[in-house]
Amino acid sequence: MDLEAYRTDAETFISELTAEYYRHFAGLKASYEIEPIYDRHASLFDLGEVSRLRERLESAASGSEERRRLRMLFDFAVEGYAGQATKHAEAELARLEASIAITVDGETLGFREAAVAQANEPDAGRRAVIERERLAATEVQLGALHRELIERQHAVALELGYASYREMCASCKGFDLAGLSAQTEAFSARTEHSYAGAVDPELRRTVGIGLDRLSRADLPRFFRAPDLDDLFPASRLLPSFEATMSDLGFELASQAGVVLDVEPRPKKSPRAFCAPVRAPDEVYLVLSPIGGRDDYSVLFHEGGHTEHYANVDAELPFEFRHLGDNAITEAYAFLFQHLVEDPVWLARHLGISADAAAIAPYARAYRLVYLRRYCAKLAYELELHGGGTDSWGALSDRYSQLLSGALQIEWPRQTFLADVDPGFYCACYLRAWALETHLRRYLQERFGPAWFESRAAGDALRALWREGQRLTPDELLDGLTGERLDFGVLVEDLGLP
């Protein structure tokens, strides 16, 4: 096996696939043509190549950089092998999502526009109608493809000799899913009694509905927080991000490979994303603006990803620039997203001082909803991918039960497969939230509360970013503070009793 040739072809594949992802989900093209890309690089995911990579990994010296690279490369090959099996379903799902239209009171909306429409809709009844139509399309028009996708993922895990998809992901990615589950269950238990008291007042203030009447259809409006629009003007969105990065020593205008795609398009995905086509030389930040604070939150999150990838050392091996544990890049994304609730940053960049105290309770409620939702998602996905024999009906009921319990509202069952990212990505988010909390404390202690105005802090981040994703979250944190990753720090960070 020629490893260097394999690595070169793998990087080309990643670049082509990410570029196609960008063009389709940015709304620049209707089709999502990933099947030809997989076909051009089919030799990467030949079962024999996957087996040879496994043999190389098992024989590599423990603790060596070569073993680190081979572990990432083997995970890439396994994901690609699964991708070969699911490529048709993925492409068809993307095509349908971009083409489906729903009708609400005689008005036609694109399927992907539904969440944006809900966020900007002041009437709860109309939000509910949009939700009903969106859920119907999810179940009737997309449901079979979602089932096919999950079934094929599970079949691949068995074919490769794993007891379940859960075991495959834990083994290939090095995730301690059982340990993480124990920590997230403890977090959910510790926040159970304080959840309603933290979230209910903010729901009533932002959407005029308390937990007793809230539905999932109202959450986009809550995240939109229209009552805060005057504090987060659209005119300051990009300038505040550019100024923040400049204070840290990063000039966006001189980053020729960075593209900020923030123009609205009918078929653009409402889910913002960063697409590192060739790190560090070609990186796209994609945002579908809806207005207000949420645009700031999303831009700064994706901006954290973008600057991380744009500042990776170009001489690093392919694996460290494009592969590795995505909890690392998600932690940098959450670090910058958190600025949108930081009172010092709000005062310096948006002139918010007296109102900053009002933003803090909302920001806490916002984070608490997300954290408890993802804790429940992990619990559900552990069951979904655990190798059991539950029926689709039983799984959809379990999904609704877990999410409803976590958020204390009735959660629809129709999204029980649509609300699942491959490869236990929810575990990346959860570990990233904890890592970001540790990292933010480190920056504040070393550079002060206004660390985001320090060139020295920018240099410290630049040094971390140059490493790409070579390190695991525990290794990164140990090198900075000597601590171990602990999800429990989030309870204290949220200021909950």
Image (cartoon, rainbow, N blue to C red):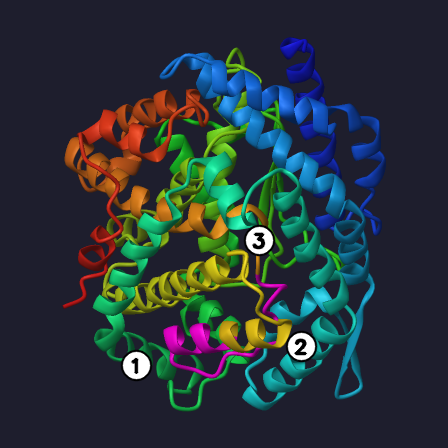
Please give left or right for residue 303 compared with residue 92 in the image: left
Question: Measured from the top left, where is residue 193 in percent x and y?
Answer: 22, 77
Give the secondary structure at mark 2: helix
Q: Is residue 30 left or right of residue 336?
A: right
Mark 3 and mark 1 lie on one chain; the one further toward the N terminus is: 1
Give x and y (percent) for residue 314: 54, 15
Distance, label 1 to label 2, CA atoms, is: 28 Å
Q: Amino acid at mark 3?
A: Asp
Assess disc 1: are there few (<14), some (14-19) or many (≥20) residues with their C-alpha within 10 Å of its C-alpha. some
Q: Residue at x 36, y 61 (%)?
A: 371
Instruction: Mark 3 and mark 1 in contact? Answer it, CB < 8 Å.
Output: no
Write the residue at 63% across / 63% down: 418
Q: Secondary structure at mark 3?
A: loop
| 349 w.r.t. 58: above or below | below
Q: Residues within 10 Å of mark 3 (few under 14, many from 20)?
A: few
The residue carrying pointer 2 sits among few (fewer than 14), some (14 to 19) or many (20 or more) residues within 10 Å by Cα, namely some
Please name the residue that numbered disc 2 is placed on: 135
Q: Which quadrant is home to the N terminus?
A: top right
Q: Nearer the viewer, mark 3 or mark 1?
A: 3
User: Label 1 belongs to which residue?
Assistant: 201
Q: Is residue 420 visible?
A: yes
Q: Which residues are magenta?
A: 400-419
Q: Amino acid at mark 2?
A: Leu
Q: Which residue sits at x=36%, y=16%?
A: 63
Instruction: Give the quarter of the figure containing the C terminus.
Output: bottom left
Q: Quadrant of residue 396?
A: bottom right
- Work out whether 343 lies above or below 401: above
Q: According to the image, label 3 marks what residue? A: 421
- Tell me the tag on residue 12: none
Q: Is residue 290 above or below residue 131?
A: above
